[in-house]
Amino acid sequence: MMEEKYIISDYCIIRNNRIVLNGEVVYTGNESSPGEFFSAAYRYFTISYAKFFKMDNLCKLGFLASELLLRGKNINDVYPGDEVGILLSNAGSSIDTDRNHQKSISKRDEYFPSPSVFVYTLANIVIGEICIRHKLFGESFFLIEKEFDAKRSYEQVKQWLDEQIVRCCITGWVEIDNDRYEAVLYFIQKTSVLQEGIAIFDAEKLTDIYLLGK
Amino acid sequence: MKEVYIISDNIVSSLGFSTPENIKRMQSGETGIRQWEDQSLSPVPFWASRVDDIRLHKCFSAHADPKDFSRFEQMVVCSVKEALSHTSIDVSDEKTLFILSTTKGNIDLLNKADTNSKAGSPVYLWQTASKLQHYLNLANTPMVVSNACISGLMAIIVGSRLIRTGKYEKVIVTGADLVSEFVLSGFNSFLSLSNGPCRPFDKNRQGLSLGEGAGTVILTSDLHVIRAHKIRVGYGFSSNDANHISGPSRTGEGLYLAIRKTLEKNKSRVDYISAHGTATPFNDEMESVAITRSCLQDIPVNSYKGYWGHTLGAAGVIESIAGAHSLISNQLIRTMGFSEPGTTHPLAIIDTNRKAALNSCLKIASGFGGCNAALLLYK
């Protein structure tokens, strides 16, 4: 049997009103808030998924990045849903929506907590949204880190692939904290034929891509 | 691949500050859930399981000045320190990892802290973990797993994998969460809180009771430090329902997949199931579907939520510890709050404390975001 290599087959970076897919700038916007930028990008790429508008900004951001990352891949034809893993991380967890929920309970005479806000006060909901969209049932969890820890993500995903817990994986960083937002997602696959120019999956390459245009 | 063992554990909850104290009080039929009237937490009275303030203050004062640590951090430190006190291992080396499992950490400080400060804020979970790292004198940056209600179980699964492959020799897994105004108001808005102590798997269950606490397991493969009663941590897996962000799948798909993968990989029979059993109508029904699809409907199953409430990020850890102690003592603990079967698929709910020959325990958990996890513990 041929030796299998792990590769970063695709990546998507969303930050500073710009979307980069596999090294190419695919969208630039001039909207003044993250939410407006995400909605403009959603329309630009003619994505049709009504649930998008119910999501909080963290989920919108993660959803957009995963949508572009998997575009045209027919992932369900290539991989069984329970063999696709997702490992995401960020620094603020769901801090943006946490602030919104807190606002709704801060004053006793304006006490209106809402289930549609509260459900987004968990970082891993973004994983759930991506799973629902693409029918993915595989291994997944969410890590909180001060900054993107490429080594830790690499080690986790490598272990999943080595132990055949998953056959491919979406991993990366999805963060929104007030006006600062940043998503860098990678699609990691195995291959036995290494095409020229394809990035080998390791911590250094994850970092190199993360730092592109930062 | 190395074997992974739990060499020490601790539970800090409404029922005590050590595992034996908690187990003893559960066996004697005590619940930690009671009604509270506390305007700082809720405009209306609520039922919850809370850690005693005076006792926490006293316990923590033996370690450090309570003024310098939040309530959440105090619970974590008390739990880690007590678990470590039963071992002689050195955790300050580079082969030790600390995994903190929590859904909301210091969320009670959100209203008070400046979350926009450049220096960070105690509300950020990495900041909390970093403070604990320095206090506990740990070499590595802690790993923070925040994955809704499966956080604790997931943290044990992740930690045991890292030992099995030799990346670390020792892993301290601590799960913790508070009963906060933030979380109470949220679950209340979902109408998922029970008016009275929760009743897992019961026909008349009305919802969950929240709980707070911290639980710690110390994992290692080092045979030299293993005590007489050793529990092995088998393989475990997670799986997403890919169905709905706040409601479990009607087919129990994710939990079924997690259980199936766990049973296949461990090649071991199951003697007992420690269920998630939150006592919400949907969760318990879903678990009955997933357990039945896995052909485990005749295996004794219980939920500990009637004793501790739903302790969120701590739940997977403290319930795994209780499961492990059932294996050690060959003693099953009844499902507090259960009296009449109330799921479409009947389960073998443990309704009286009883002796049983036990070799393995399947621990399962499910949470918002469609997440599910399963793990096998065995002698």
Image (cartoon, helix red, strand yellow):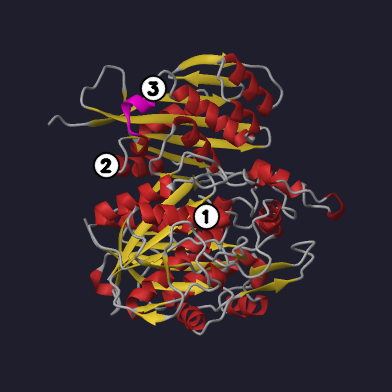
Q: Which residues are magenta?
A: A73-80
Q: Which residue is mark 1?
A: B283
Q: Is residue B67 left or right of residue B246?
A: right
Q: Which mark is residue B213?
A: none
- Distance of label 2 from label 3 (alpha carbons): 21 Å
Residue B338 higher or lower than A148, as above or below:
below
Question: Between residues B324 and A103, which one lies in front from this camera angle?
Answer: B324
Whether residue B166 appears in this view of the structure is no
**Label 2 with label 1: CB-CB less than 8 Å:** no
Q: Residue at x 59, y 57 (%)?
A: B105
Q: Nearer the viewer, mark 2 or mark 3?
A: 3
**Label 1 with label 3: CB-CB less than 8 Å:** no
Residue type, label 2: Gln
Q: Residue at x 34, y 65 (%)?
A: B298
The residue carrying pointer 1 sits among few (fewer than 14), some (14 to 19) or many (20 or more) residues within 10 Å by Cα, namely many
Residue B274 drawn at (x, y percent): 42, 65
Check the residue under mark 2 and report the chain it is in. Answer: A
Residue A4 higher or lower than A23, as above or below:
below
Q: Residue at x 53, y 78 (%)?
A: B17
Check the residue under mark 3 and report the chain it is in. Answer: A
**Label 2 with label 3: CB-CB less than 8 Å:** no
Residue B1 drawn at (x, y percent): 21, 55
Q: Which residue is mark 3?
A: A74
Question: Between residues A100 and B361, which one lies in front from this camera angle?
Answer: B361
Does residue B295 belong to the magenta stretch?
Answer: no
Whether residue A129 appears in this view of the structure is yes
Residue A89 drawn at (x, y percent): 49, 41
- Report whether mark 2 lies on the same chain as mark 1: no
Q: Secondary structure at mark 1?
A: helix
